[in-house]
């Protein structure tokens, strides 16, 4: 049923779902700026004409943005110290065990 739903949002000339699977890796490479300009044009044209791939593109972009934002945050000093103490305690248990 969901396959029929996907096809309702596509033009008749759009690539098949098998071809869409090939675009997933290229979409990720597009987001990471790892595609040559000609490939970027092809991938963007596909995304513009294929709702499922546009949704995947938006989801991947959102996930990468959240991860990037999370990686820039720093844990509070008190939490870092508690983690260090716990790591030392585990290291002692391992060496004594």
Image (cartoon, rainbow, N blue to C red):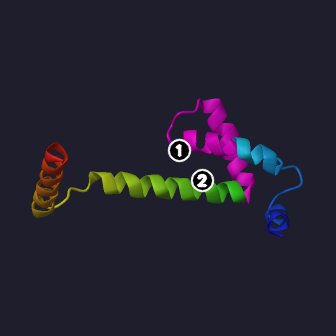
Residue placed most toward the observer, 34 or 82? 82
Q: Could you tell me which residue is drawn at 62 percent across and 56 percent down?
A: 56
Could you say whether the residue bearing mark 2 is in a helix, strand or loop?
Answer: helix
Q: Is residue 76 magenta?
A: no
Q: Is residue 78 left or right of residue 29?
A: left
* Residue 68 horizontal/vertical position (percent): 37, 51
Query: Which of the two discs, 2 and 1, labels the residue nearer the N terminus?
Result: 1
User: What residue did someone put label 2 on?
Assistant: 57
Q: Residues within 10 Å of mark 2 (few under 14, many from 20)?
A: some
Residue 34 in the image: above or below residue 24: above
Magenta stretch in the rendered image: 23-51
The residue under the point 56% across, 59% down is 59
Determine whether the residue tagged by mark 1 lies in a helix, strand or loop. Answer: helix
Q: Quadrant of the N terminus?
A: bottom right
- Residue 38, horizontal then vertical, whole percent: 65, 31
Relative vertical location of residue 70 with respect to residue 26 in this rendering, above or below: below
Residue at x 82% of width, y 47% of height: 15
Cβ–Cβ under 8 Å for marks 2 and 1:
yes
Q: Residue at x 84, y 65 (%)?
A: 8
Residue 16 location in percent, x, y? 83, 49
Foreground residue among 68 and 33: 68
From mark 2 to mark 1, how far is it between C-alphas?
Answer: 8 Å
Q: Which residue is mark 1?
A: 31
């Amino acid at each position: 049923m969901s396959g029929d739903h996907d096809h309702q949002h596509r033009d008749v000339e759009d690539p098949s779902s098998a071809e869409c699977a090939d675009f997933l890796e290229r979409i990720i490479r597009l987001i990471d700026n790892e595609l040559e300009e000609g490939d970027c044009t092809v991938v963007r044209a596909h995304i513009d004409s294929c709702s499922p791939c546009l949704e995947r593109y938006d989801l991947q972009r959102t996930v990468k943005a959240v991860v990037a934002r999370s990686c820039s945050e720093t844990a509070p000093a008190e939490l870092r110290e508690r983690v260090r103490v716990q790591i030392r305690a585990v290291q002692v248990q391992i060496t004594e065990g």
